[in-house]
Structures are given as C-alpha cells and as structure tokens.
Image (cartoon, rainbow, N blue to C red):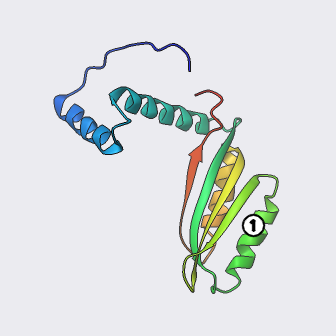
Amino acid sequence: MGSLARFSVAMDEDLLARFDDLVARRGSAVNRSEAVRDLVRDALVDAEWEDSSEDIVGTVTMVFDHHASDLSDKLDSLQHAHHEHIISSMHVHLDAHNCLEVIVVKGTSAQVRAIADGLLGTKGVKHGKLVSTTAGRHL
C-alpha cells in the first residue's frame, strides 16, 4: 500500500447516516475510510470487467438437482469444453437431491461471461450466479 492521501466528501446527512449504519454492521475493524476504499476497489473491479481484453477471474456458483436427466453430464461437458479457462471446481452434496457447485473461471470478461451463461442457462440449474473479481494488479 502506498502513502495515504486525504480528501473530503460532501454528502447528504440522511445518506451519511445510512452509510454509517452500513459501516457499523461490518464490525469494529471497519471505519468510514476503509468502507470508502472498499467501494472504490469494487468500482475499479467493475471497470476492469468492462474491458474485455483484460484477463479477469470469476466464480460461477450454482445449485442443481443431480437427479435431473443427464444434467451432471451436460455440466461436466461444458466444463471440459472450456478446460483452458476453468481453474478449479468444488462440488458439494447439499442433501439427497441438491448439489452446489462453485467453479473458478479465468479469461477475458467476454469468455468468462459466456462460460457462466452456458452453465447457468443449462436446463435443470435451479439457481446460480456469476461473481466477478480481479487478480488485483491495479488495486
């Protein structure tokens, strides 16, 4: 971390009160400054995701019924088709029917989104989400 620069922010009192409530919910280790730094980092990650030429990282989390007709095979085939972009996966048996899978994907934002859309759009996936992040080179 480099040297710290101080700056002022003018904010509506109601908005500031809501922000302070958010900071308080995050715990004693977080203060306004750290919360603002987190927001800036999030905005920078979002901006990096918009540049499809940069390599980014994401996780695809999905829940599905493993008894659904050949769904596991379809999801495995999709992952094998993109093996060069899939770093890791974790499969968890939630109960007698439902599984949770978390897949770590790396590539351009367009590649990662396409892989996530393919997985999450597979018939039988009950719920899922792509969460984006970055390797942190620019943060």
The residue to which callout 1 is attached is 78
- 10 Å crowding of disc 1: few (<14), some (14-19), many (20+): some
Answer left or right for 107 relative to 25. Answer: right
Quarter of the view holding residue 101: bottom right
Answer left or right for 76 relative to 119. Answer: right
**What is the x, y in percent for residue 22?**
30, 41
**What is the x, y in percent for residue 117?**
63, 60
**33, above or below 5, in the image:** below
**115, above or below 14, in the image:** below
Q: What residue is rendered at 67% in x and 54% in y?
A: 104
Quarter of the view holding residue 90: bottom right
**52, above or below 92, in the image:** above
Quadrant assignment for the N terminus: top right
Q: What residue is rendered at 67% in x and 86% in y?
A: 69
- Look at the numbered disc 1 and give the secondary structure of its residue: helix
Q: How many marks?
A: 1
